Image: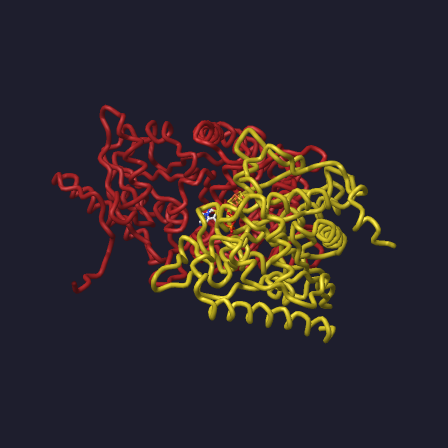
Chain colours: A red, B yellow
Amino acid sequence: MSAEQANHKRIGMEVSFAVAEAVKMLEVEAIAAYPITPQTHIVEELSQMVADGDLDAEYIPVESEHSAMSACLGTSLAGARTYTATSSQGLALMNEVLFVASGLRLPIVMTIVNRSLSAPLSIWGDHSDIMSIRDVGWLQFFAENGQEAFDLTICAFKVAEDKRVLLPTGVNLDGFSVSHVVEPMLIPDPKLVRDFVPSYEPQLRADPADPVMIGPIGIPEIYTEAHMARDVALIQSRKLIDEVFADFEKVFGRRYHALESYRADDAEVIVMAMGGMAETAMGAVDTLRNEGIKAGLVHIRVWRPFPFDDLRAMLKNAELVLVIDRALCAGGPGGPVASEVRSALYPLEKRPQVACQIAGLSGRDVRALHIVQMLKRSMAQAEAGELPEYELHNVREVAQ
Amino acid sequence: MSDYNVYAARLLPRSEFFTPGHRACQGCGPAIVLRQVAKALGRNTIVVNATGCMEIVVSPFPHSAWEIPWVHTLFENTAAVASGIEAGIKVLARRKRHFTDSGKINIIAIGGDGSTADIGMGCLSGALERGHDFIYLCYDNEAYMNTGIQRSSATPMGASTTTSPAGKASKGQFSRKKDLGYIAAAHHIPYVATVTPAHPFDLIDKLRKAAAVEGPAFIHAFAPCPTGWRCGADTTIKLARMAVDTGVFPLYEVVDGKWSLTHEIEDFEPLDEYLFAQGRFRHLKNDAEFVKQLECDVHQQYEEIRARTKAGA
Ligand SMILES: Cc1ncc(C[n+]2csc(CCOP(=O)(O)OP(=O)(O)O)c2C)c(N)n1
Ligand code: SF4
């Protein structure tokens, strides 16, 4: 079957439902979840599928996100393909358990519908939630739109469950501005999806016929080695991610990369963004190009493992890189992505300057126009040799 | 004589699944409980163990004291992990992707009183309410022993611990022991029981019943801890027996909501003998009035349970 045939169906669908559809096509065996806006539509849809008998899975309606991820540890240890989804406070409540999932090397897949964190309470989208857990040893993908959310969910299972990886994987998408949008999407034949991701055959499980101890104490003599093993798997997953993306293209016709770009080849100034904002930034790049500014866009699809080498190669000829972050590392480097980009570029002999603007917190609108403004501002600051560590874009003056 | 094996030690399995070589203190009550539990449940069992003494002493890598699969993840999520294992096994069996066909697998979640009565309470309640087919066993040494004898909400009133120390202005633990059996029973689960290591046949019998029911079972195991209770390593079993005979720890069962005392007491042994066989109550030695009050509480609690039994409630 050709890629065109595989994608015969183009239908309008809410992105959350498309994610649930991917989970169903993958014949996920266990789901444990707790509702939180804006993730709710995904888990509601999944529980309906289970209730209707369309998906033969165990749906565990737990009493908290801490238990959601804990139950996922259990189902995964029993050998079941496991899925969950959360956002914001839910992700924060899971924090402790996320380390266990990666430490035990359990290929749980989780959709993270990105949202800001309290206080003040806010249900709208930004990347504060995911950035607070970026170092827990999970793979992290970012989707810009519904099609990508669907496709990356499928790729996530294939990568996570590969014996060379065996690590939990997060698929991030922006709350509301992606999750709740109805989009035209190419929904492939489920059989192709099932052929693409074979059923999960666990490496490690709790089996009375072959008793093992899972999660023993790691005394100082072995803890470092255990963590190194996990780190090696995480870093080496890069190769496999590329393989899976390439295979995905063969079957479904769409190609993903750890790092992607738009009009960046000859660009002197580069905008960097993640998630839905990357799409908006394309428009900004077009506007800037029309004005004669050699602008380009680079966006990060795979946030963990961080694609250091690719980033260096892609940015080495630029003069200025503007990273637009949707989270704030309080009291630290400002934008978490900018901080990573700076550290990636540091070894280069001739390196571009890096500007950081923090924008779009709690779903505040960021349009192409804003991105143009931000870039021009950073260019002027760089020109004057006055580039700040970071700035919050478009903040109203607050009386002290 | 259907309960013949309950009385005949000879008929107990010889096999040990909780083996010697662990690093528990001498006379550790929880370790004795687990050995008996392992005998009762047998090989076809998966253990999920909360952080705490019993997790630490059995698992310093690469050593293991368990001959059956054993999982530790965190301090407070044991019941949720066990829920997941149960659900996972269920769906794999249904989809014919199961890895073993050795019959029903017992899943037992094990936590200390701190893990059960405090930090893991919500998680336990969730798992009981959802009706997963598993056993939850709380070994109750009445303190957070692994972090060094701190109070939990199951520490009895008057006990001195490092976070409820006795002092000029304090009589030690200031609140009444949280009653786990009541809380579990309030979830309307099919089986709740209390056990002690001093009543091993009763313990084994109850664990087997717990394994046989469909749905959640909750076992509250009284487990003296010589280190925390400041008592001799050779007094563990004696103290467990005294706890039952004084009424401090009534042995009962709640089967499908029906309460029954499995060890009726006619005349309570005096409480002070039990208290002062331990160091954690020694500051109360000159406080007869307070001890009297404690004894009253104990008897009142026992009568409450007796009333439930009688009412067939
Ligand atoms: C979230 C969290 N808080 C605190 C701890 C530290 N901690 C480990 S074990 C323990 C006490 C365990 O007490 P209990 O459940 O009564 O079991 P015991 O040690 O007495 O066997 C504590 C406080 C932890 N591991 N995790
Ligand atoms: S401190 Fe108490 S519970 Fe812990 S191992 Fe020692 S005797 Fe057992």
Q: Nearer the viewer, residue A297 or A397?
A: A397
Horizontal placement of A246 versus A317: left or right? Answer: right
Instruction: Identify the residue at image location x=23%, y=45%.
Output: A390
Write down the quadrant of residue A333 in the picture: top left
Of the 4 image quadrants, the one containing the C terminus of chain B is bottom right
Residue found farthest to the right: B1
Residue A306 vertical placement versus A277 (above, below):
above
> Residue B62's x, y, as percent?
55, 29
Residue B142 percent coordinates (x, y)? 52, 55
Q: Which corner quadrant holds the N terminus of chain B?
A: bottom right
Q: Is residue B233 above or below residue A91?
A: above
User: From this viewpoint, which residue is outermost toward the left?
Assistant: A384
Q: Nearer the viewer, residue A292 or A108?
A: A108
Point out residue A115 in the picture as x, y percentages from the top left corner: 41, 55
Does residue A46 show up? yes
Residue found at x 70% / y 53%: B133
- Looking at the image, residue B270 sits to the left or right of residue A318; the answer is right
